């Protein structure tokens, strides 16, 4: 019954929060409208998204978001430092292939987005079978350490959330 | 508006301006299309973020109300920036990047942009379907 009424609780909450933020004021009216949207839209769109991944652990998701935000600030400073203070001749750009343990499309999308936003790496492509991620590094004297960091810092945490 | 609020707002605006400028300078300075992609995807995130924080501080300082729809702009930026970067990287892979530079895959697998007429998401989806059927 609860699954029928609220097929996707995370989406419902996200819609409510986004609607209230768009209004920019917490009023009974905006919360009520947000609740209506949060209840109606997931029910109407549920048939188009049959293989929703089931997410586990609010704490883990919030911890992951904070970790990524901290890393984005760090990434900005590092990349700005490289742009300003490193001569092009000293730059060691490299392609690296990151073998993936994640299988769901949503989890891989999250990982690819994270990799793009964080220090010195941009995700460029997947292998045709979807099991390897192609990543470009701005400055990677040691490509293996980049792979280890992505797998240990981000993929391990996403595994706990998605699978 | 009190002086302290004005100083805080100015500090964030200047910081944001510096990061945006560095991002633009990176676009000019870095040597190849793929390395150039790094500057605007990263350095400008903090540039926009700084302006948004300044905007929130200003609305508290001058009107005394907390304005939070700036956070929504941050959210949309975090969702769209990686996708834009991915599209540009893919276009570059198709047009310019020599395949011998890319890391090789095991078992004769190809990268998605090299294999003709396959769509990764669809392939992954069908793969999943067959697994469930079997």
Image (cartoon, rainbow, N blue to C red):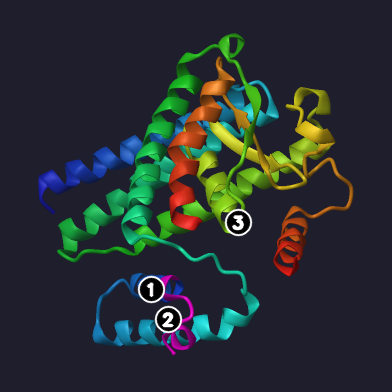
Residue A147 at x, y = what percent?
Answer: 55, 29
Q: In which quarter of the image is the C terminus of chain B?
A: bottom right
Q: Does the magenta stretch include residue A5?
A: yes
Which residue sits at x=50%, y=44%? A114
Mark 2 belongs to which subunit? A
Q: Distance between the residues labelled 3 and 2?
A: 25 Å
Vertical position of residue A60 compared to residue A54: above or below? above
Task: Report the span colored magenta.
Answer: A1-10
Q: Do the residues labelled 2 and 1 touch (CB within 8 Å)?
A: yes
**Magenta part, dominant SS:** helix
Do callouts 3 and 2 mark residues in contact (Cβ within 8 Å)? no
Tell which of B15 and A34 is nearer to you: A34
Which of the labelled discs sits on residue A104, or is there none?
A: 3
Q: What element carries label 2?
A: helix
Q: In which quarter of the image is the N terminus of chain B?
A: bottom left
| Residue A11 percent coordinates (x, y) | 45, 72
Residue that badge 1 annotates: A13
**Chain bearing mark 3:** A
């Amino acid at each position: 019954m609860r699954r029928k009424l609220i097929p996707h609780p995370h989406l419902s909450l996200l819609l409510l929060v986004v609607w209230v933020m768009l209004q920019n004021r917490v009023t009974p009216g905006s919360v009520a409208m947000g609740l209506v949207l949060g209840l109606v839209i997931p029910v109407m769109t549920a048939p188009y998204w049959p293989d929703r991944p089931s997410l586990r652990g609010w704490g883990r998701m919030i911890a992951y978001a904070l970790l990524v935000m901290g890393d984005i600030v760090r990434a900005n400073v590092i990349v700005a430092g490289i742009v300003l203070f490193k001569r092009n001749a000293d730059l060691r750009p490299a392609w690296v292939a990151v073998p993936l343990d994640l299988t769901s499309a949503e989890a891989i999308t999250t990982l690819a987005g994270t990799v793009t936003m964080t220090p010195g790496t941009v995700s460029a492509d997947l292998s045709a079978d979807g099991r390897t991620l192609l990543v470009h590094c701005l400055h990677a004297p040691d490509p293996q350490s980049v792979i280890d960091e992505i797998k240990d810092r981000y993929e391990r945490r996403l595994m706990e959330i998605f699978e | 508006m009190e002086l302290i609020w004005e100083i805080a707002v100015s500090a964030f605006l200047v910081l944001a301006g510096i990061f945006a400028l560095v991002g633009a300078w990176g676009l000019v300075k870095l040597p190849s299309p793929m390395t150039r992609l790094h500057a605007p995807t990263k350095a400008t995130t903090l540039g926009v973020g700084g302006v948004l924080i300044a905007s929130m501080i200003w609305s508290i300082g001058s009107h005394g109300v907390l304005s939070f729809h700036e956070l929504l702009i941050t959210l949309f930026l975090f969702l769209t920036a990686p996708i834009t970067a991915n599209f540009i990287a893919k276009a570059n892979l198709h047009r310019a990047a020599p395949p011998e530079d890319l890391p090789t895959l095991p078992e004769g697998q190809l990268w998605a942009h090299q294999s003709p007429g396959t769509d990764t998401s669809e392939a992954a989806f069908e793969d999943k379907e067959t697994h469930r059927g079997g």
